[in-house]
Image (spheres, rainbow, N blue to C red):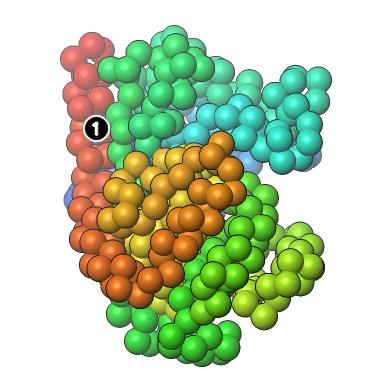
Amino acid sequence: MRICLTHMRHAHSGGTERYLNYLAQYLCERGHEVTIVCRSHRESPHPRARFVVLHNFALGPGWRRWAFARAVERYVRKHGNEYDVVFGLGRTWSQDIVRMGGGCYQTQLDAMSDFVGAASSRPTQLRFKDRVALAIEQRCFAAGAYRRIITNAAMVKRDVMQRYGVPEAAIEVIYNGVDLERFHPRHRDGRGAVIRREAGFAPDHVVFLFLGSGFPRKGLDLLLEAFPFVTATHPHARLLVVGRDSGQPRYEARARALGIANEVRFLGARTDPEACYGAADVYVLPTRYDPFANATIEALASGMPVVTTDSNGGSELIESDVQGSVFSLSDGREKLVQALRTWCDAGRIQQASIAARRLAERHGIESKMQATLDLLQAVAAEKRHTG
């Protein structure tokens, strides 16, 4: 097939960007012709993948989003007949299939409104770039603007149906996949052990890992507030924080104020997440909203039980008390404290580690790429049949 993939930014970091690279490589290796339509790009994920750059002049993130979506519209109108199927991975409205990797934009805003202390769902308080993103999304889900929609969790599927009236038959749930070789329990005996040692954690400590960028949405504040209650009953508990956030000094100050500075280590941004998983025992993500946090499946593949919220679409894979724990933010801090205490037992961790890896092995990245290819082929056949 001749396949057009559209996304404003092509790079080698970021969840959607990694998905784009995996998919382009997978398709090229199977003989398909792949064109990536973007505003900027890095080196190609495969020698056969080609780029079409649509770089209209625009100032500010809001105008860049709108300008790219309009440029894609013009490109598809002119060149759409050259492709069997057009697959949109970002915020555009001109495609046969759209993947909602980031979930509904209004849902993201609503999830953060309480934290920032403002009703951000009110249009008068939205930033310009937010209004643009919402306008693009509304056009994306207008009747006749798509043939199929991919969501990475049933939670997002329900949200799209409720907000935009999309029929259930038009939505395919394909969970995020994981590179089972890169994310593997063997890192515990290699680089993971080095990071653990450098952080000052002993072999008999139970090390919880928070890994993610954008601390407010990921809920690091909730984890820090809960952790003193954990160390009070389990003094061998420790916390490792990895990720990029401009507000990190505030979180470090809060840890000191809570009296847990000696139990918490902040490593900042790193490029070796697979080793960071190997440095800890349990992964914790009390996120306020994540359509499907990639770290969820990466941690499972690394042999770690996962503690997360039901606001993370990745929680749909987890059986509580088998591969981790799932709780609701509406239940309050006590549920998070209870879950963390549950996983302070080395025997439970060891048993769950095996179950976590087995679960991840059912969600390898290749199986997700094949499911996506199956849908691409089905839509291409549908287009040929209907003209």
Residue 285 or 378: which is nearer the viewer? 285
Vertical relation: 231 (above or below) 94 = below
Q: Is residue 55 something one can see in this rendering? A: yes
Residue 115 or 297: which is nearer the viewer? 115
Q: Residue at x 18, y 15 (%)?
A: 385
| Disc 1 packing (10 Å; few <14; some 14–19; many ≥20) | some
Q: Residue at x 58, y 85 (%)?
A: 199
* Circle 1: element type: helix
Q: Residue at x 41, y 65 (%)?
A: 343
Q: Quadrant of the N terminus?
A: top left
Quadrant in the rendering for residue 158: top left
- Where residue 334 appears, as percent x and y from the top left, is 55, 50
Q: Amino acid at mark 1?
A: Leu
Q: Residue at x 53, y 29 (%)?
A: 104
The residue pinned by badge 1 equals 375
- Where residue 7 appears, as percent x and y from the top left, is 50, 41
Q: Quadrant of the C terminus?
A: top left
Quadrant in the rendering for residue 310: top left
Vertical relation: 255 (above or below) 13 = below
Residue 134 or 6: which is nearer the viewer? 134
